Image (cartoon, helix red, strand yellow):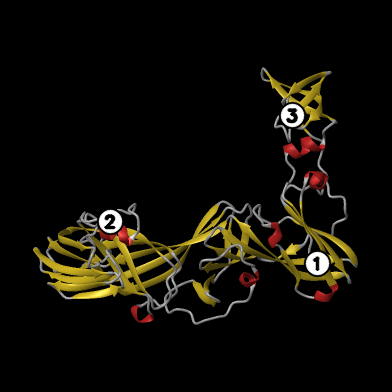
Amino acid sequence: MDIKLTPISAASIVCAIAVQAAHSAPPHTSAPSLTLYNDNFAVVRDTLQLTLKPGINQVRYQEITTQLEPDSVIFRPLEKKDQLFVLEQNYHSLPVNESLLLQHYEGEVIDFEVTRNNQTEILSGKIIRSGTSSGVPVIEIDGKTRFGLPGTPLFPALKDDALLNPALNLQLDSATSGKISAELAYLTGGLSWKADYNLVARESSDQLDLSAWVTINNDSGKNFDNAKVKLMAGDFNKIAPQEAQLAQVRMMAAARVKTQITEKDFDDYHLYSIDRPVNLDNGESKQVEFIRASGIKSETRYLYNGAQIDARYPANMEHIRNDPNYGVKSNTKVWIYRQFSNSKDNGLGVSLPKGRVRFYQQDQDKQLEFLGENNIDHTAQGALVSLYTGNAFDISGERTRLNYELHTRENRAQESFEITVKNRKKQAVTVTVIEPLYRWTNWEIVDHSEPFTKTDSQTIEFNLKLKPEQEDTLTYTVNYSW
């Protein structure tokens, strides 16, 4: 099937005012189907019921968005596929407006409504230049030329088939007459969605209650009534072919959490379907509850990374190795992380789309207090969710460099640090001390006061268990060689 996409040009203005070809009856449409993506675009699918005659049929469809991407349009018959062919698809993005009508009536005389001193009169003037290209119309009145409109232009009545909204004109060649169903699908901007998560920690407990919502925004220029809405989660290359995004999905088992949104596996992405029809008016933001779960086991972690590194410093290990002052500045803040497992055993086990997470905790009066917020990326089932929520008020750290020796002839260096952590809380805490080994890739810890764990090629961690109102100090020495 050959599809010809023709954008509107200045020569097509007459078409916007009155398309002369005979059109078939406007198509009847059923409830639309939408698939929304995180990045402010969507796939819109409409099922059209067409009444055709044998031969060439002109079908105009105006129930489209104002941000339709013309080259993404796919029209396909759902029946009699070998008897219906698309000859042309023409997208008219310029509906009737004042500028178009002025351009259309260039060289002709029209009336203008002029108000002076609370008196309204009608003047006739000839449109010498519409102002479309220059920005300033030129009008001749009583043999005199003026720049700018003298008043509100009064145009002749529009034709019945004038385009008042953007429209898609289809030229179809039908081998038979009668009714036929077809699907019209296209990409559009102006439709987006996001996920928001509210986590509530119970008083004196690490158990969490979760309520998650999806927010759908419609700025597409079109209302959607009783729409079937799907939400696609993942990181997409928008330039890639869209056929895969319009394909059928493969079902998977739904998670055992209370939700009115069903999750489906879709290739390397995840698709969420709202289980009931949704009305989306243009300019509307709609929230739909996504997940509700309770009794989620979580853990609060305190992390201290005392190395205050200047991000503007050249990321060159040779510079770092030769600069004795690199990494000397100390950060005193201890980070608070709340983490939990996204597993079925922990009351979840659903693929979580990226979004904002807000933390609350009940106080002694059973009221909710805000503790912090952060963003999560797309999170698979079974993954660990770990979120920074702020800095501890009653826990602090101090990192002091004790010694640095650089032996260039021997291709080695040695550095020693002392880290002190103070706990002013009334509860015992465990603080994980993170130490980056940034001088070189080959290193060896030759002395340490506390056990450590190597977490990656250039990071070690110590765990300090602190009683209430206690402070503790650890030391270590690292050798670098190259």
- Left or right: where does residue 380 sit relative to residue 420? right
Residues 45 and 444: in front is 444
Give me the residue at 55% from left, 66% from top. 236
In the drawing, what numbered circle is on residue 309? Answer: 2
Q: Quadrant of residue 429?
A: bottom left
Which comes before the other along the chain, label 1 or label 2? 1
Task: Report how far apart the C-alphas of labels 1 and 2 lie in the structure.
Answer: 60 Å
- The location of residue 46, given as percent across then percent down, is 69, 65
Residues 78 and 397: in front is 397
The residue identified by callout 1 is 2
Q: Name the mark nearer the viewer: 2 or 3.
A: 2
Label 2 SS: loop
Q: Quadrant of residue 441?
A: bottom left
Which comes before the other along the chain, label 2 or label 3? 3
- The location of residue 13, given as percent across then percent down, is 80, 44
Q: Answer whether residue 438 is visible to the viewer in this image.
A: yes
- Left or right: where does residue 264 sit relative to residue 404? right
Give me the residue at 64% from left, 74% from top. 247
Q: Name the mark nearer the viewer: 1 or 2.
A: 2
Type of amino acid under label 1: Asp
The residue identified by callout 3 is 137
In the drawing, what numbered circle is on residue 119? Answer: none
Q: Answer whether residue 371 is visible to the viewer in this image.
A: no
